[in-house]
Image (tube, rainbow, N blue to C red):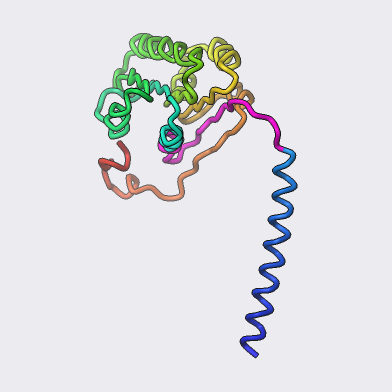
Amino acid sequence: MASSLSDLSDTRHAEKMAKKRAARVKMLKTKTIERGVVIVNTGPGKGKSTAAFGMVARNLGHGRRVGIVQFIKGAWHTGEKAFFDSYKDQVRIFTMGEGFTWETQDRQRDIKAAQAAWDKAQTLLVDETINLVVLDEINVVLRHGYLDFAPIRTAIEQRPTMQHVILTGRNAPEDLLELADTVTEMKPLKHAFRAGVKAQVGVEF
């Protein structure tokens, strides 16, 4: 009896999966557009930059070139910067920040650093040899008003057709969310930091 029930369950499962596969094949046939996409990783949860760097690794695996501008990080050593420096033929990385906005306590200095970072970003967004551009923590810069969004929108809209762009950071502005093709909001359920665990090498930086 138990064997019969198991066989019936296996048969139903196979039928269900066959229907799902047929539906997915049909759906995929409708996806015919091929172009670069704009991706926004935002929200208060951990993983926004980490997800972006995962896509960097994916592009490197395909032999493609990547450009990265870090708008906030720069005041401390990070594992990703050290790693990507070993891929100089494929990765152009500019770590332009001076730390979190509360560390400098100088708005004009932060604006100047943000503009310098954006100047680097613009050189990447016109480079047809670069498949992926990561603007790390630019959402924070926009949130504080250190950069105007209008020229950023224009540069993204006028970039090479097949170039992908990822913008990370909390509190992405509504204009950016409207521009994006894909938006992911990271939400924290638990975080070790709240339990008193300090930032760990290889996890947070």
Which residue is depicted at the point 43% across and 38% down? 54
Residue closer to the observer: 57 or 106: 57
Residue 164 located left or right of residue 33: left
- The picture places residue 96, in percent across and down from the top left corner, at 33, 18
Q: Quadrant of the C terminus?
A: top left
Q: Which of the 4 quarters of the picture holds residue 16? A: bottom right
Which residue is depicted at the point 32% across and 28% down? 87
Is 44 part of what is drawn in magenta? Answer: yes
Residue farthest to the bottom, as pictured:
1
- Residue 146 against residue 162 in the figure, above or below: above
Is 32 part of what is drawn in magenta? Answer: yes
The residue range painted magenta reads: 31-53
- The picture places residue 63, in percent across and down from the top left corner, at 43, 31
Which residue is depicted at the point 75% across and 47% down? 26
- The picture places residue 3, in percent across and down from the top left corner, at 62, 86
- Residue 53 against residue 101 in the figure, above or below: below
- The picture places residue 139, in percent across and down from the top left corner, at 48, 24
Residue 142 located left or right of residue 7: left
Give the total of numbered labels.
0
Which residue is depicted at the point 66% across and 76% down? 9
Q: Which of the 4 quarters of the picture holds residue 198? A: top left
- Residue 162 against residue 183 in the figure, above or below: above
